[in-house]
Image (cartoon, rainbow, N blue to C red):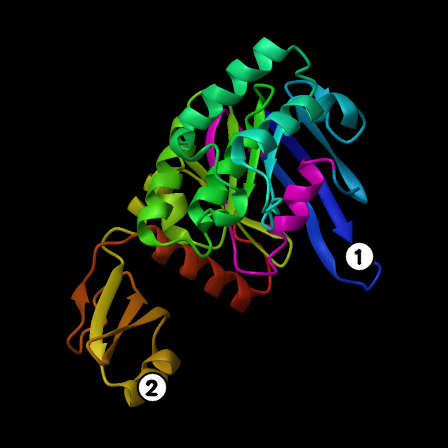
Amino acid sequence: MLTIQNLSKTYANGVQALQDVSLEIPKGMFGLLGPNGAGKSTLMRTIATLQESDTGTMFLNGLDVLGEKEEVRKLLGYLPQEFGVYPRVSAEAMLDHFAILKGITNGKERKETVDGLLRMTNLWDVRKQRLGTFSGGMQQRFGIAQALLGQPKLIIVDEPTAGLDPEERQRFLNLLSEIGEGVVVILSTHIVDDVGEICSRMAIIDTGRLLLTGDPRDLSADLAGKIWKKMVDKDEVDSYQRSMAVISTRLFAGRTVVRVHSEVSPGDGFELAAADLEDVYFMTLRETREAGGLVN
C-alpha cells in the first residue's frame, strides 16, 4: 500500500503542480488519469524520489518515501515518459548493465534474471539486436524489463502507450496487467481506455488537484441511464452546448455525435447511450472546471 497525504508542489515560476493531494494506492493496477499538464508527471517524479514536494507525507508499507529515498529506490521500478536507450547496444547487454547498477553482482544470478525478464517481455528472440533497431513498443517493453530488475514492490509507468500502434499497445497493456497481480503498479496516462482496460482502481487529476477516485467499473455504472447521444451537423454543436450539459463530441461519418449528461431524456431525437469511463472523465473535468473546485 502506498499512502499519500496532503502532497503539494509549487514551482519557482509560480505554477502549483500539486495541490493537497491525498491518495491510498493498494496492490494491483492503479490508473492516474488526467489531461496533459494536469500534474501527473510531477506526482510520478515525486513518488519516484526524483524531486521534492513542498508539503505532505508519503509511505510505502510503512517506509517514509520522502525521508528514506535510498531505501525506497531499492524497492522501486520506474519507466518515465521519456525513456532513452543506447542505440548501438544490444537489449541483452544493456539489461545486464542495468542489473549491475541495480546491485545484482553475482554473474549467474544476473544472467538468470536478465534471461527471465527478456522472456517475460517477449524480447528473447531479439535480445542480440541493437536497441536502436527496436520499434516504439519494443523499446517500451524493454523499459518495463529494466523497471522490473530487483523485484520491485512499487512500479511507476508514465504515459507508456503514447505513440504505440494498436497491436503494440495491447501487448504492452497485457504485460502490465500480468505484472500488477503482485505489486503496486501506477499507470499515469491521459488515455482513458488504458485505465478502463486494466486498472481496478483509479483517480482523476487536473491542475494539480485530485478530483475523483474509485473503481472504473463502479464509476461508469453510476452514470447508467444518464448519458444520451445524438448525431448532429457540425454547425448545430454550439447550440447544444449552450442549452445542454454536453460532456463530449465525437466525429462519425462526417457528422458529430453529441453526448449529454441528463437525469431524464433531453428529447429532440436523443437516445440512451451506454455509459463508459470516457463519460466519467469528461463529465468530471467539465463539472469541476465550471464549479471552480473539487469533486468529492
Location of residue 282 in the rendering, given as x and y in whole percent from the top left corner: 42, 61
Is the N terminus in the top left, top right, bottom left or bottom right quadrant? top right
**Residue 193 got which mark?**
none
Location of residue 94 in the rendering, given as x and y in whole percent from the top left corner: 60, 33
The answer to which image quadrant residue 151 occupies is: top right
- Answer above or below: position of 209 versus 230: above
Image point (34%, 75%), residue name: 244
Read off the magenta span: 24-49
Q: Identify the residue under disc 2.
A: 239
As drawn, the residue found furthest toward the right would be 12
Q: Identify the residue under disc 1.
A: 11
Image point (35%, 80%), residue name: 243
Res. 53 in view? yes
Q: Amino acid at mark 1?
A: Tyr
Using a 10 Å C-alpha cutoff, classify the residue at mark 2 as few (fewer than 14 neighbours), some (14 to 19) or many (20 or more).
few
Q: Nearer the viewer, residue 262 or 209?
A: 209
